Amino acid sequence: MSQVIAGAHVVLRPLATADRARMRDILEQPAVADRWLGSQTLDEAVAELFKRDDHTPFANEARGAIVGYIQFAEESDPDYRSASIDVFIDPGWHGRGLGTGAVRTLARHLLRERGHHRVTIDPAADNERAIRAYRRAGFRPVGVMRAYERGRDGRWHDSLLLDLLASDLD
Ligand SMILES: CC(C)(COP(=O)(O)OP(=O)(O)OC[C@H]1O[C@@H](n2cnc3c(N)ncnc32)[C@H](O)[C@@H]1OP(=O)(O)O)[C@@H](O)C(=O)NCCC(=O)NCCS
């Protein structure tokens, strides 16, 4: 079911085995690792990017380079059907609108092509860059999920749930 999804500034293409070294290079940088790894080792986190049992992974390409990773997961219960997104961008490419572009592109695909009526994303409550990017992509804050995820420091941290409904799109 995976396909290339083209946005205005990014191209999301299905993640391939050949992307492993590049993904590892990005993920091991502290600005990404501190937000992504939790209690996992780097090797465990890299391996999980490539699993397709509960999510669909993409390499995020822009200006001819692989600049990051994005995935979606879907809730299959028809009465709760919705999708969620996770994303990271190479720190060397941060602050250029690529995170916003990737999330906007995938969210619109999920709402318009895959028939979802609701997409969610749940950054750490103190991840201001992520929250700004997701708000700019059209997501709205729902509320703080207290002690939602365990960080690399072994402690539980709050996350902010944001959502985007099909009816929010212009
Ligand atoms: C979160 C992430 C995907 C955003 O990608 P990005 O390409 O850097 O984001 P964008 O350039 O599209 O937007 C960043 C926004 O945050 C702002 N910003 C930049 N640095 C910031 C900082 N230190 N604090 C707060 N906001 C910041 C930018 O100005 C921009 O907002 P604006 O366009 O309204 O001015 C990326 O930073 C990342 O991979 N972070 C590490 C992993 C991570 O946190 N993943 C998210 C897990 S939910």
Image: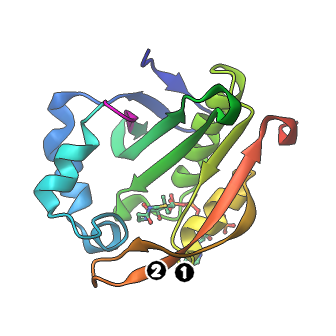
Q: Which residues are magenta?
A: 53-59
Which of the pair 97/155 is nearer the observer?
A: 155
Can I make out residue 63 in this image? no
Can I make out residue 10 in this image? yes
What residue do we see at 70% from left, 31% from top?
79
Query: Mark 1 = which residue?
Result: 126
The amino acid type found where label 2 is placed reads His
9 with respect to 167 (left or right): left
Inspect the magenta stretch and tell me whether residue 57 lies in it.
yes
Helix, strand or loop at disc 1?
loop
- Residue 92: image quadrant is bottom left
Q: Position of residue 88 (x, y in %)?
A: 41, 55
Quadrant into which the N terminus falls:
top left
The amino acid type found where label 1 is placed reads Asp
Inspect the magenta stretch and tell me whether residue 22 lies in it.
no
Q: Position of residue 117 (x, y in %)?
A: 75, 33
Q: Which mark is residue 157?
A: 2
